[in-house]
Image: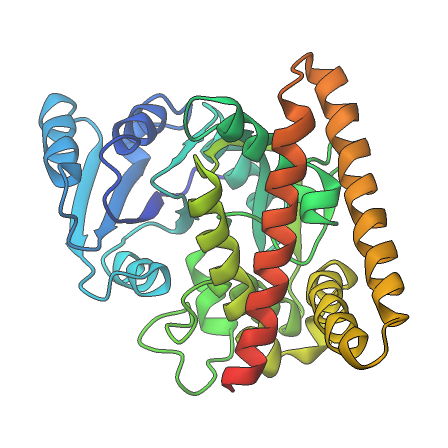
Amino acid sequence: MPSLPTVTIVVPCYNEQSTIRLLLEAIRGQSYPLDHLEVVIADGMSTDSTRQEVSSFALAYPELSIRVVDNPARNIPCGLNRAIQSSTGEVLVRLDAHSVPSSDYVARSVADLQAGRGDNVGGVWEIQPGGSGFIARSIAAAAAHPLGVGDAHYRYTDQAQAVDTVPFGAFQRDLLARLSKPAGLGSGPFDESLLTNEDYEFNTRIRQAGGVIWLDPEIRSSYFARPDLASLARQYWRYGFWKQRMLRRYPETLRWRQALPPLFVLSLIVLAIISILFPPAGWLLLIEIVTYLMILALVGLQQAIRRKNPAMLIGIPLAIAVMHLCWGGAFLWSIIRR
């Protein structure tokens, strides 16, 4: 029986006063021995009471080692790098400040690593509403539906498998020495030139080095989705913009689910322009829009019946449309900006 390694949980954080204590309570409740655990939070100079929440929790529960480091850059990859630089664990587990891991999250992650199932292992998100009201609940449902997220298995699968990427992830420290470091990467293992998609880029380098990204549905965490359509739109605009930047470096990683939103948005724009000079093209545009709306309506109806919530009939189509249009539009805008 292999000995238990020490584990550092690294957490990038900025203005998370409403959820940071939920995360810390879940970490304290882990089945993994607390004397083998430490938490390093890279705080982006929060302007709310996040640091006070962390400090009060650390004082109340000194048996859990908690350390806060500054992340003046205020972005996720820089925060991860600062936290890793300050860590001491043999295994590094990434979590977000708005996530709540299950009580066996660390134990199962370490077990998979020791069994050699993957070089970076992760699990499935149980997506929770980020607010009250039917829109927040609809966004959470849309973020777990294949029409909204394509083949992102970590949002809904129940089958263990090798995948392209996992949320958060857990890996042994010695993995970092085996990875290539592209120019401009920064001072740590995560690419500081990417404001999002840093985890996908990191996992791409692992796979290029011959490693395996392993998804274990027994490793579970709750993740709070965006509370409203405006914040959802900003999130997916950011995702699409930086995904294109990442794909410039790794074009071979493009997947069908990533290509469809920008192609859909591009087709709407092209048909709208052509229809000005060639009116029959307007009928093609109309057919495309009506077909898309019908598909959204069917998904909304199916989810409304399944969840016994009639409001989903409106909320889920709205959320999925925002995800598609913002992701696809930002992807195209990133190409133009290039």
Q: Is residue 89 above or below residue 243?
A: above
Observer able to see residue 171 = no
Observer able to see residue 177 = yes
| Image-quadrant location for residue 234 | bottom left
| Image-quadrant location for residue 132 | top left
Q: Residue at x 52, y 69 (%)?
A: 241
Residue placed most toward the observer, 267 or 227: 267
For the image shown, how many numbered marks are present on the structure? Answer: 0
Residue placed most toward the observer, 121 or 201: 201
Q: Residue at x 56, y 37 (%)?
A: 111
State the image coordinates of residue 226 (x, y, percent, origin top left). Answer: 45, 39
| Image-quadrant location for residue 313 | top right
Q: Is residue 184 above or below residue 82?
A: below
The residue furthest top is: 308
Q: Is residue 155 left or right of residue 23?
A: right
Instruction: Locate the N terminus by quadrant.
Output: top right
Q: Residue at x 82, y 32 (%)?
A: 298
